[in-house]
Amino acid sequence: MVRLAFRHITGARASQIDEIVLDTERELILGRGASASIRFDPHLDIRVGRLHARILWTGAEPPQFELEDLKSRNGTFLNGRLISAPVRLTSGDIIQLGALGPEVQVQWDMRITTKLTLIG
């Protein structure tokens, strides 16, 4: 399992943190829509599309992720640079949805789970 943390830096949700644990899920959507995994305020974060960008889990050990813009009107930025194709993420990167739009910092770590068998 991998735990991702999204720290909202700017925007309507500034200072809030979303945590997502991925086990079999391989895709996270960022946007204002009700089906987005990481949701932005639908009334205040107007530069964010309903389905703005996605993060794909592309490798297990070490965890590897890619960020892709979903043909949003205002673009997706990674560490201040507009992306035009999927790009690899590094833990600690800053994603911005739209020029002057909200920013989130993404970080992740592995969670090791073990099963315990009780005898007796």
Image: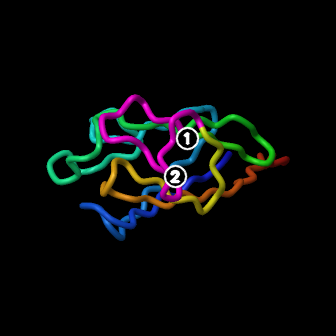
Place of residue 7 in the rendered image (x, y in percent of width and height, measured from the top left)? 45, 63
Q: Residues within 10 Å of mark 1 (few under 14, many from 20)?
A: many
Type of amino acid under label 1: Leu
User: For the image shown, how many numbered marks are present on the structure?
Assistant: 2
- The residue lying furthest to the top in this view is 71
Q: Is residue 117 above or below residue 33?
A: below
Of 1 and 57, the residue lying toward us: 57
- The residue lying furthest to the right in this view is 119
Q: Coloured how?
A: rainbow
Of 86 and 92, the residue lying toward us: 86
Disc sitting over residue 32 in the figure: none
Place of residue 9 in the rendered image (x, y in percent of width and height, measured from the top left)? 39, 67
Q: Residues within 10 Å of mark 2 (few under 14, many from 20)?
A: many
In magenta, the rendered stretch is 67-86
Seen at 30% across and 57% down, the residue is 100
Place of residue 71 in the rendered image (x, y in percent of width and height, measured from the top left)? 39, 29
Whether pointer 2 and pointer 1 mark residues with C-beta atoms closer than 8 Å, the reply is yes
- Any magenta on residue 72? yes
Is tag 2's residue or tag 1's residue first in the polypeptide sequence? 1
Quarter location, residue 58: top right
Q: Is residue 44 above or below residue 70?
A: below
Disc sitting over residue 78 in the figure: 2
Residue wearing tag 1: 67
> Chief secondary structure of the magenta span?
loop
